[in-house]
Image (cartoon, rainbow, N blue to C red):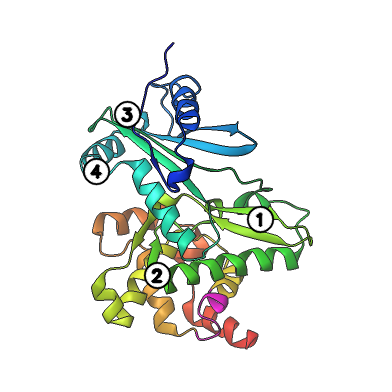
Amino acid sequence: MQPKSFEWQFYKPAAATQGFIDFLNQQTSIAITPGITDRHQVISCDFEGQGYIIKRFSPSDNRRWDRKIELTLKSYWISGAEKSFRGARWLWEAGIPGIKPTAWAVHGRGYHQVSYFVYERIEAQGEVQDLLEQDSLSVQQERQLIQDMAKISHQVHQAGYRHTDIVPHNFLAQQQPQGQIKLLLIDTDKVEKASALGKIFKRTKLFFDLRCLRRLRFSPEQLSLFFHQYFQGGTRLRYLQQWYFWVRGGFNLYKRKKMRKRLPRHLLKLNLTLLLGQQSKKD
């Protein structure tokens, strides 16, 4: 089978050697199988001693018909691979711990559009979600993971960007030589710039920044720890109320109705005043 040729766009022009381009074309045409219904298909490969991850995007790969339609429409503006590449570049250049982009390519538009995002492979222990579920995890290690998630989330927002899916499984944990764990933010197709209006009006910006945290499903104690770190000890009840507005569905009435059934009980009955009181004890 002859490899399909793409017009690859590289983060560093010096990397665009013919050998590397041929290698990427070979990998994307053979190692990733079109037509398999999976949310994303990824492969790990090596070229000249460097490890890479290639991630495939296509509206046709999604199982849910509503997502197929949504991504098909979006493909006429920007592909999933370009969006991932752009988000990774923004975070990388802002000094936010994450993935280092290498290249992207796209073919076609609409339902059958196929695009590929390439980034340098990360050697990691796993996702934070997996680590938090381990019985062997100490209380101190759990606290550190949650605090580091909050620090990175704050850095993203301070840099003028938003990652609209801040959840534990979008952070990779990387073991450092000194024994510490470094978190890396992934899933960069969810990264976007804060609006110009939000930059002018800080309260407006914070309101929409908090939307990025709407999918956190931590316990009240973990939420208290997260927000204490995120707001650097300056949490206010109104901040928690704004976050809780997004948790319960925001402006979308259909989603608000759905969240009443889907949210865990401890979040449906969350006492924000008590949550704020727990943070006061930390001060």
Residue at image position (70%, 60%) is 181
Q: CA distance from mark 1 to mark 3?
A: 33 Å
Q: Which residue is mark 4?
A: 74
Q: Nearer the viewer, mark 3 or mark 2?
A: 3
Please, what is the three-letter code of the amino acid marked with disc 4?
A: Lys
Task: Provide the residue span drawn in magenta.
Answer: 227-234
What separation in Å lies between label 4 and label 2 (alpha carbons)?
24 Å
Residue 261 visible in rendering: no
Whichever of labels 3 and 2 marks the residue nearer the N terminus, that label is 3
Query: What's under tag 3, amino acid-wise?
Result: Ser
Please name which of the two marks, 4 or 1, marks the residue nearer to the observer.
4
- Identify residue type, mark 2: Leu
| Mark 3 and mark 4: Cα distance apart in space | 13 Å
Q: Residues within 10 Å of mark 2 (few under 14, many from 20)?
A: many
Instruction: Say which residue label 3 marks.
Output: 60
Q: Which residue is mark 2?
A: 210
Answer whether residue 228 is magenta in the image: yes
Please, what is the three-letter code of the amino acid marked with disc 1?
Leu
- Using residue 135 as the reference point, say whether residue 27 is left or right of it: left
Q: Residues within 10 Å of mark 3 (few under 14, many from 20)?
A: many
Q: Secondary structure at mark 2?
A: helix
Say which residue label 1 marks: 132
Mark nearer the N terminus (3 vs 4): 3
Distance from disc 3 to disc 2, alpha carbons, whole Å, reads 32 Å
Residue at 27%, 27% in the rendered image: 112
